Image (cartoon, helix red, strand yellow):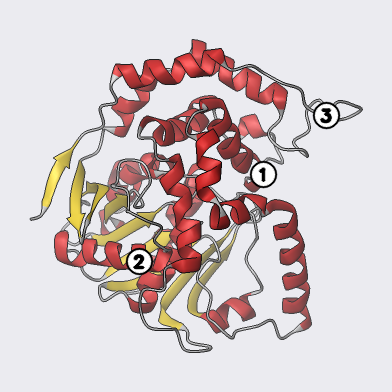
């Protein structure tokens, strides 16, 4: 591999001390009180939960432990066009591992995929078959985590162009499968639509949309009405990120508690918590994801991707009703910001050759249901033979 240099996460102690000092100095305030509201998240991040989480953060949480875990797999910085892309690269077992790029979204990070890298790259270590191995690439999106920061907002189509160049030109991994949820699903969709090196895409959220494709059947129209209602209730963050992200940044860049609440509320709202929030994520998982935003001061530039969606018009216009023609696999988990539409509607946007409906799981599938997601990626990859 040429054009890349090794990288290791090493957050200075002074940065950690500064985060903890602001955390401990935070002055708590009130939330609405009344019958049934003590444990409620209906007004946003629950006060009792946040106090408990932040007490654990200040007194017990150990960043160095998780930094060591994040440094377990080989990492690199790759210069692509004019930006440094941080990535994990784990070479797969066997003679012919398939190239696979896993793209996260907001408010996630590469941490989402940390515990599935080895399973995907070395299935034989877990009772599987080395023939199912992938060479796994996990990049931080531009402006996120340990990647470089763009000068101004860029959109998912531009990120897809960068990631396609990363896979083809820098890593020499053509014929790759692109996988993702959240922004990762949109980026992976763009990679499948126009990426020169992409063979297929596997998505666990409905992100990439074809212009001019509209609901036609009653089932599709009913779905569209429900989706619009869900977005009306949950989409305030999206409107702020896509219109005035800089205004939001002044508060969030200065307050670890504020950034944590903004992020954790989405993990609560978009995850399958029917068996309890504490049964889905540990405090350490929630905090490590937050710490990646804080340690590299990337909360502000991470939100820019939303504004980039509105103003980054890189590339030729997509023709009306154009479709992703490369094979697309769908892993549909029941709980999400906006769940998958009926297959008939998705099929008009992309060439769906594989579809799995799961009874449990939500938006952050790699963390919530890792075995389901890994198994579905493998099944989709086999179907491409």
Mark 2 vs 3: CB contact within 8 A: no
Q: Is residue 352 left or right of residue 316?
A: right
Which quadrant is home to the C terminus?
Answer: bottom left
Q: Give the residue at x 45% y 43%.
A: 300
Mark 1 vs 2: CB contact within 8 A: no
Q: Is residue 271 left or right of residue 303?
A: right
For the residue labelled by badge 2, is the local secondary structure a helix, a strand or a loop? Answer: helix
- Tell me where residue 14 sits by quadrant: top left
Mark 3 vs 1: CB contact within 8 A: no
> Label 1 to label 2, Cα distance in Å?
29 Å
Residue bearing mark 3:
32
Q: Earlier in the sequence, mark 1 or mark 2?
A: 2
Q: Give the residue at x 32% y 33%.
A: 70
Q: Is residue 85 left or right of residue 384?
A: left
Q: Position of residue 100 (x, y in %)?
A: 30, 59
- The residue closer to the viewer here, 155 or 268, is 155
For the residue labelled by badge 3, is the local secondary structure a helix, a strand or a loop? Answer: loop
- The residue closer to the viewer here, 2 or 261, is 261
Residue bearing mark 1:
269
Q: Position of residue 103 (x, y in %)?
A: 39, 55
Mark drawn on residue 158: 2
For the residue labelled by badge 1, is the local secondary structure a helix, a strand or a loop? Answer: helix
- Pointer 1 local density, CA inside 10 Å: few below 14, some 14–19, many at least 20: many
Q: Position of residue 23 (x, y in %)?
A: 52, 18
């Amino acid at each position: 591999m040429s054009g890349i240099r090794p990288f290791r996460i090493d957050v200075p102690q002074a940065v950690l001390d500064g985060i903890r000092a602001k955390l401990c100095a935070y002055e708590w305030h009130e939330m609405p009180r009344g019958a049934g509201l003590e444990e409620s998240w209906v007004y946003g991040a629950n006060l009792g939960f946040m106090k408990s989480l932040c007490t654990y953060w200040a007194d017990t949480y150990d960043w160095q432990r998780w930094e060591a875990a994040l440094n377990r797999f080989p990492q690199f910085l790759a210069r692509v066009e004019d930006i440094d892309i941080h990535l994990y690269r784990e070479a797969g077992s066997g003679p012919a591992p398939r190239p696979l790029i896993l793209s996260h979204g907001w408010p996630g990070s590469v941490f989402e995929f940390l515990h599935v890298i080895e399973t995907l790259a070395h299935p034989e270590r877990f009772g599987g078959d080395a023939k199912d191995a992938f060479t796994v690439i996990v990049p931080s999106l531009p402006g996120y985590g340990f990647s470089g920061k763009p000068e101004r907002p860029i959109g998912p189509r531009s990120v897809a162009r960068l990631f396609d160049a990363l896979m083809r030109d820098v890593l020499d991994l053509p014929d790759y499968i692109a996988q993702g949820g959240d922004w990762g699903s949109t980026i992976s969709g763009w990679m499948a639509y126009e990426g020169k090196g992409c063979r297929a895409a596997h998505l666990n959220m409905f992100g990439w949309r074809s212009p001019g494709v509209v609901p036609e059947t009653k089932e599709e129209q009913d779905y569209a009405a429900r989706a619009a209602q869900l977005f009306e209730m949950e989409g305030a963050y999206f409107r702020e990120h896509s219109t005035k992200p800089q205004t939001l940044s002044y508060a969030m860049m200065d307050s670890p508690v504020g950034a944590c609440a903004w992020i954790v509320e989405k993990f609560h709202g978009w995850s399958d918590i029917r068996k309890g929030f504490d049964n889905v994520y540990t405090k350490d998982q929630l905090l490590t994801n937050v710490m990646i935003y804080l340690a590299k001061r990337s909360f502000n530039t991470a939100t820019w991707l939303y504004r980039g969606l509105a103003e980054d018009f890189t590339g030729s216009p997509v023709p009306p009703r154009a479709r992703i023609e490369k094979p697309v696999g769908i892993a549909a988990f029941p709980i999400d910001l906006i769940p998958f539409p009926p297959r008939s509607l998705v099929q008009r946007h992309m060439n769906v050759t594989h579809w799995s409906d799961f009874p449990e799981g939500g938006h952050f599938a790699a963390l919530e249901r890792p075995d389901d997601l890994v198994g579905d990626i493998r099944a989709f990859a086999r179907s491409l033979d």
